[in-house]
Image: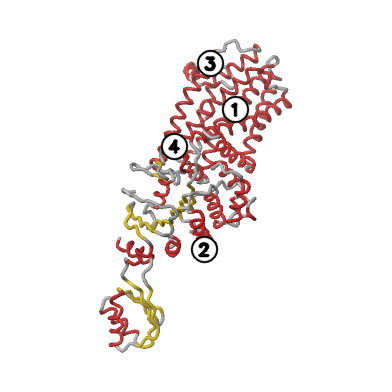
Amino acid sequence: MKLYRIYGITLRYLFLFRHSINKVADAFYWPVIDLLLWGLTITYVRSANPGSDNFIMVVISGLLLWQVVWRGQYEITISLLEDLWNKNLINIFTTPLKLNEWIVSVIVLGIIKAFISLVFASAVALFLYQVKILFYGFYLIPFVLLLFMTGWWVGFFVAGIILRYGTKLEQLAWSTIYLISPFSGIYYPISILPVWAQKVSYLIPTSYIFEGSREVIQKGYLADVSKLWNCLILNLVYLVISLIFFKKSYNKVLENKGLVKVF
Amino acid sequence: MDNISLDLKEGEILGFLGPNGAGKTTTIQMLLGALTPTKGEIVYFGKDLKNNHEEILEQVNFSSTYTDFPIDLTVKENLTYFSYLYNIKNRKQRIERITEIFRLNDLINQPIRNLSTGQKTRVNLAKALINFPKILLLDEPTALLDPEAAKYIRDFLLNERKEFQVSIILTSHNMAEVEEVCDRVIFIDKGKIIADDTPDNLARSIEVSHVKLFIKDGLKRTVELCQKETISYRIEGRYIIVDLNEQDIPEFLRGLMSQGVYYDEITIDKPTLEDYFLQVIGKK
């Protein structure tokens, strides 16, 4: 794996970020709109139910942390789609670039952009609702890393499907991540879900993080650290499976259509 | 593709010819590792492409009319990230030089979306040359260029071969271009190589020449003679163009004299690569 090639591909997507209004809107506009809508709703609910002070913290921090999952997945699938739309995949993969280097590049890109979005949205949350994401202290690091991992495996799984079946399935790039959101307990405890949905939640890594984040908000610490381990193990298993699937999809393209005809 | 085998010598320019869908682009894709052959091997510099992908592709590059670049990126940004992928030393100087060669200096800060098709082709070629490739694969490199720009590119390719011994494979539907530039031509049809020779030899394999006569008197009799002898012909004003085997030309001209046909201009065009192409396609 060569760093200069990883840098080259990351640079290519960052150039695009600089020029594309869509990309800037993704990074800044939507997080702010989400924060405004949810924040104002919760402010209203809180005024009608005095004593629910943690509620706004739970929802706003849930929103901020969900940005990490979403961004991790989105950068992988959109980066692939950009090159499919531009018929640029063959230009990239007929250089010495390896698939592993491309994978690392889009992960790095996701981290950079998530950091930009998260810092911006956190500042907005602090300004509007006095919600501090740094309230989580040390726990913020494992929370963010584990949420990223979920975004990655969903991203590579979707990217693998798009590679195999083409851009006619591009909607998956925007929609798939929301399949796991009801089971993640972003804004509510898992215990309110029906029993069958709770069982599904045990298999969704993000549910452990959002449960943990609420525990930190309520108690000030994470009593049950096994939540982090459960999340890590599930994420690692899914990430390995999704990477194998993605690589197999890529090889399938090379065997069947070739990179010129994949779009 | 069906059981094809070919080689490319250092400094050689090899043309791929064939009708649409013959397998030219497919072959180029396979040579780039963008399509995996079901069997067989691709060897560059004595090394297998499958196991030495990175090392080989550092010395190979390609350009195709079927690919594009990210349209929001400028010419400079596109060339910059490719310069990283190929680990180019002195990348700033290299980008300046390559944009100068392909007359892109004034367009360097323009996004690709603002460029004409011909300008995009030149960016594509600039990218293909950025890593000083030893082998260049060009899929219809001049198809979308105006004649002046196409000639410039042909001259450039010939110079690259002369100065740096670059080996080139190119596909083209421009027969004159292939004849001018290529040392050798491989004709592909339905995934098979059906001829592999120099452009001259392929053209020579066609026995028919085009004889063009300006008929001052006796055009009708000339046509009758052609019809009687079942000779293919076409008429352009007072000119008649007949297709004849070289050894049959004197006999035909004697026949005209005996019919009292009077002509005062004659040109004999030797068969070209285009004739070869048309004959092979015609036989299909």
Mark with earlier residue (4, 3): 3
Tag 4 residue = A250
Q: Which mark is residue B151?
A: 2
Q: How crowded is mark 1: few (under 14 residues within 10 Å), some or many (20 or more)?
A: many
Q: Which mark is residue A94?
A: none
Marks 1/3: CA distance?
19 Å
| Residue A68 marker | 1
**Given contact means CB atoms under 8 Å apart, are the residues at marks 2 and 4 in contact?**
no
Q: Find the distance from the CA under tag 4 to the CA under tag 3.
A: 31 Å
> Which residue shows up at 61% across the image and 17% down it?
A213
Task: Nearest to the eye among marks 1 and 3: give it.
Answer: 3
Q: Label 1 sits on what residue type?
A: Val
Question: Do the dots labelled 2 and 3 sit on one chain?
Answer: no
Pinpoint the chain carrying mark 4: A
Q: Name the residue type under label 4.
A: Tyr
For mark 2, name the chain.
B
Residue A229's label in the rendered image is: 3
Alpha carbon distance from label 2 to label 3:
65 Å
Q: Of the residues under marks 1 and 4, which one precedes in the sequence?
A: 1
Q: Name the image quarter holding residue A126.
A: top right
- The reply to the same-chain question for discs 4 and 3 is yes
The label nearer to you, 2 versus 1, is 2
Q: CA gap, disc 2 to disc 4?
A: 38 Å
Type of amino acid under label 2: Lys
Which chain does the numbered disc 3 sit on? A
Identify the residue at horizontal 52%, vertical 64% (top origin): B147
Residue at the spot x=68%, y=30% of the render? A120
